[in-house]
Amino acid sequence: QVHLVESGGGSVQAGGSLTLSCAASGVPYSSACMGWFRQAPGKEREGVAVIDSHGTARYADSVKGRFTISQDNDKNTLYLQMNSLRPEDTGMYYCAVDERWLMTKTILRGELTYWGQGTQVTVSS
């Protein structure tokens, strides 16, 4: 059974930084594709940063140059380093993972099987 647990969310002022973590059990990160997604109130969920099973990353245009996705296969943990945060980055952040091989643009659309419960990020101006 796959279980994902996000952590690291919180409240920060604009320009600040946060690092999100997603610890997984039941699926080896070394052979999976995974990503971070967010949903703001009243808006649809959107892909933020994803990584395929070969380690190729893809980012939403809105976060390029500010966010970095990475993984630690030994710890089976996915990270999202978020710098220069903006109020529009506010939302619930979810990690997701899939054992299938998927292209990064497919991953970014959120077509993944397993999802965490989310961690809230609030950026104030």
Image (tube, grey):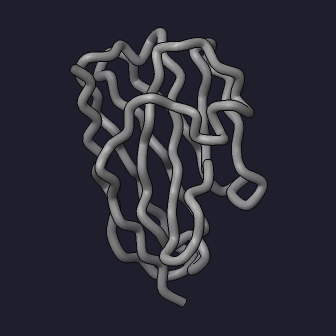
Q: Position of residue 102 (x, y in %)?
A: 64, 19
- Please name whichever residue, 76 or 117, is drawn nearer the observer in this view of the structure: 117
Question: Residue at horizontal 59%, vertical 63%?
Answer: 44
Left or right of residue 4: residue 50: right
- Please name whichever residue, 89 or 26, is drawn nearer the observer in this view of the structure: 26
Q: Position of residue 123 (x, y in %)?
A: 48, 78
Question: Residue at horizontal 28%, vertical 35%?
Answer: 4
Left or right of residue 28: residue 63: right
State the residue lying farthest toward the right. 61
State the residue lying farthest toward the top. 31
Q: Position of residue 37 (x, y in %)?
A: 52, 50
Q: Quadrant of residue 26?
A: top left
Question: Residue at horizontal 26%, vertical 41%?
Answer: 5
Left or right of residue 65: residue 83: left
Q: Is residue 112 above or below residue 100?
A: below
Question: Residue at horizontal 48%, vertical 9%?
Answer: 31
Which quadrant is home to the N terminus?
Answer: top left
Left or right of residue 112: residue 108: right
Q: Is residue 74 above or below residue 37?
A: above
Q: Is residue 108 above or below residue 27?
A: below
Q: Quadrant of residue 61?
A: bottom right
Which quadrant is home to the C terminus?
Answer: bottom right
Q: Position of residue 88 (x, y in %)?
A: 61, 76
Report how many numbered discs are placed on residues in the image.
0
